[in-house]
Amino acid sequence: MDMPPSKHKYVKEGDSVSQFDSICEVQSDKASVTITSRYDGIIRKLHYNLDEIAYVGKPLVDIETDALKDVASEEDVVETPAVSHEEHTHQEIKGHKTLATPAVRRLAMENNIKLSEVVGTGKDNRILKEDILNYLAKQTGAILPPSPKPEIIPPLPKSETAPAAPKDKGTKIPIPISKPIVFAGKDKTEAVTGFHKAMVKTMTAALKIPHFGYCDEIDLTQLVQLREELKPLAQVRGVKLSFMPFFIKAASLGLLHYPILNASVDENCQNITYKASHNIGVAMDTEQGLIVPNVKNVQVCSVFEIASELNRLLTLGSAGQLGTNDLTGGTFTLSNIGTIGGTYAKPVILPPEVAIGALGKIQVLPRFNGKGEVFEAQIMNVSWSADHRIIDGATMARFSNLWKSYLEKPASMLLDLK
């Protein structure tokens, strides 16, 4: 392992240095650190020049100390910057090793205390902060209170009870040793391809659109009853009838009154194109990823025809066999996220479209009727997003109210069906 080049050099060969004097500054990938001298002595050799890469564990400088002039030259070694309180530095003074953290060394330096004169009480005779304070107290005559240390007591087994007898001071309490968890999993990297790559491109373009959000709840009690009545008829014709065909047809009827929601705008927002066809997309969750095929010309289709086309798109989508024509040309989108879960959402517009709706799950909730009586209602939440550059909030709200009225009173759709 190596470290980036040093940025500043504070000493040169022949200079005299003392403990904690700055030798040079090095920069790792996380921090810029000043290396200080551990000894009093003379710089005899610099192993690196300015801006050269210094290798961890290799000598940085040779320092000749007064105590060891006739024995051998001492070396400062490059260390990685400290990242936890457990790491420590050390120095050799008069033939023995003195262990102390940088904070303890600084405390000793500020009080003109030589570490070689302090007896360490830590592990491997490490000098602790308390050792410095106690040494300082002895010199000044002050009395320092002992620092309390918590006693670690392992929990007793459930089958045993705590003894009432006093603790035996001679008995050592075993400290449990935790074994490191072995995990052999590895990260993997794969290229973004297929539908995921298309999603990256589409969503990146969508970030340029200022989204306007509008939410509401729909009482589908009557629609639930109507669907139950029509399901057997659809099955006879070989079609599975879900709620989605009703949602799509109601959206198309609403778009006839508010065509701005079935439009597109050019990149510079200079021209709006009103689409004649209602090609309403339906977001699908497949093994290949998110896909949005669309039902073409919904404005001239019946609810049954929409259901039949949805069955075809779902079958092809599950098999990954949707064609380009099925996936392009959409003018408006509905996402039935409620089939997975959730109530409200924040759908993202699919350019060049200007509006999208997200449908939550249907829940049985208590509501009041016109007489103030509580009844069980089939409630679904809807979340709309619109391109706020060309669509105002009032337009989105009025469209949502009309769409809501068709679904809450499905018989009203008969008046506008063509």
Image (spheres, helix red, strand yellow):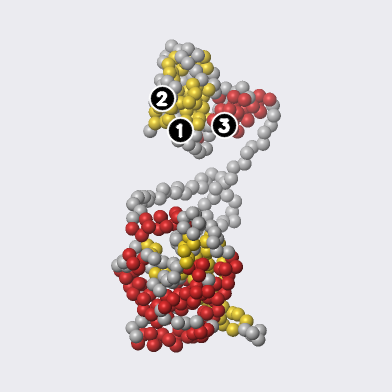
Indicate the position of residue 78 as horizontal and vertical percent values: 44, 27
At a point 52% along the width and 79% down the height, the residue shown is: 407
Task: Check the picture and name the quadrant holding the C terminus.
Answer: bottom left
Q: What residue is at 51 percent from the left and 84 percent from the top? A: 415
State the image quarter where residue 376 is shown. bottom right
Report which residue position mark 3 lands on.
103
x and y percent of residue 371 in the render? 65, 86
Residue type of the residue flagged with mark 3: Ala
- Give the side of residue 334 with respect to residue 186, left or right: right
Which sits in the foreground, 124 or 199? 199
For marks 3 and 1, give the CA distance. 21 Å
User: Residue 110 lies in what quarter of the image?
Assistant: top right
Mark with earlier residue (3, 1): 1
- Gap between marks 1 and 2 measured at Cα: 13 Å
- The alpha-carbon separation of the residues under discs 3 and 2 comes to 29 Å
Amino acid beneath label 1: Ser
Q: Secondary structure at mark 2?
A: loop
Please name the residue shown 48% across and 26% down the image.
7
| Image height of 193 relative to 250, above or below | above
Residue carrying label 2 = 52
The residue pinned by badge 1 equals: 28
Residue in front for this viewpoint, 30 or 96: 30
Q: Nearer the viewer, mark 3 or mark 1?
A: 1
